[in-house]
Image: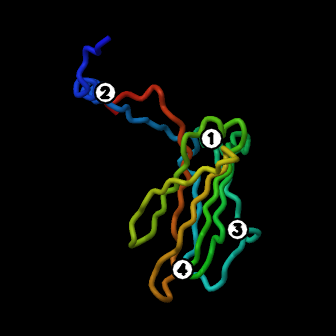
Amino acid sequence: MKHWLKPSTGILLLAFSGCKKEEEIQYRLFNCEEDSALIDIGADEILTEDQCETIPLQSSSCLSDGEETVGEAYIWPCAAPIGTEHDIVIMVDRPYDQKIAKATVRLESDGRGEDEYRLTQDSANEGLYKLTVISVGSERERRQDFVQFKLWEEDPDASDDD
């Protein structure tokens, strides 16, 4: 029995079948846009875990009564000299961890602008996200950098026109 397609025709068919436009995933903020903290950059002393505050992450309604907490965030150390590694950790409570598609932080520093970074999700704990950053600055510089914590869920209702 002979095949009716030439080998080049089969390759061409495979190429066209993979040309479907990929849909971009849309996200919406899951936690309160006011969830934030400050990092003391250029401090003389390093403030360790037990000296740094835990930042409660609120639901998107931003009610501060403690009833709508979806997780918490930590920055260790929260104060340190220039050149120090800072761990930024977000822990999302159950069952909310099942809804989170990604976690990011927006870092803002006077005179240095702002950047947004995606945290790495732990492979064994869906609700645990971590990012390590190194503080930079000039000798004897002292400042407080603003950190905004963002939890994102996929938005199936978003349109391509947004």
Image location (x, y in percent) of residue 18: 33, 29
Q: Nearer the viewer, mark 3 or mark 4?
A: 4
Q: Secondary structure at mark 2?
A: helix
Could you tell me which quadrant the C terminus lies in?
Answer: top left
The numbered mark at residue 52 is 3
- How far is the residue under mark 4 from the one under mark 1? 34 Å
- Asked where in the image residue 84 lies, by quadrant, the reply is bottom right
The answer to whether residue 59 is above or below residue 143 is: above
| Residue bearing mark 2 | 14
Label whose residue precedes the other's in the sequence (3 or 1): 3
Name the amino acid type tagged 4: Gly
Identify the residue at horizontal 59%, vertical 40% (top origin): 100
Q: CA distance from mark 3 to mark 4?
A: 19 Å
Lateral position of residue 139 relative to residue 125, left or right: left
Mark 2 is on which residue type? Answer: Leu
Local secondary structure at mark 4: loop
> Residue 51: horizontal and vertical position, in percent?
74, 71
In 3D space, how far apart are the residues under numbered discs 4 and 2 (Cα atoms)?
Answer: 51 Å
Q: Are marks 4 and 2 in contact (CB under 8 Å)?
A: no
Camera-side mark, 2 or 3? 2
**Mark before the other along the chain sequence, 4 or 1:** 1
Question: Seen from this angle, which residue lies furthest right?
Answer: 50
Amino acid bearing label 1: Ser
Task: Estimate how packed mark 2 is, as few (under 14), some (14 to 19) or many (20 or more) residues with alpha carbons within 10 Å.
Answer: few
Query: Could you give the CA–CA distance between mark 3 and mark 1, rounded to whole angstroms?
Result: 22 Å
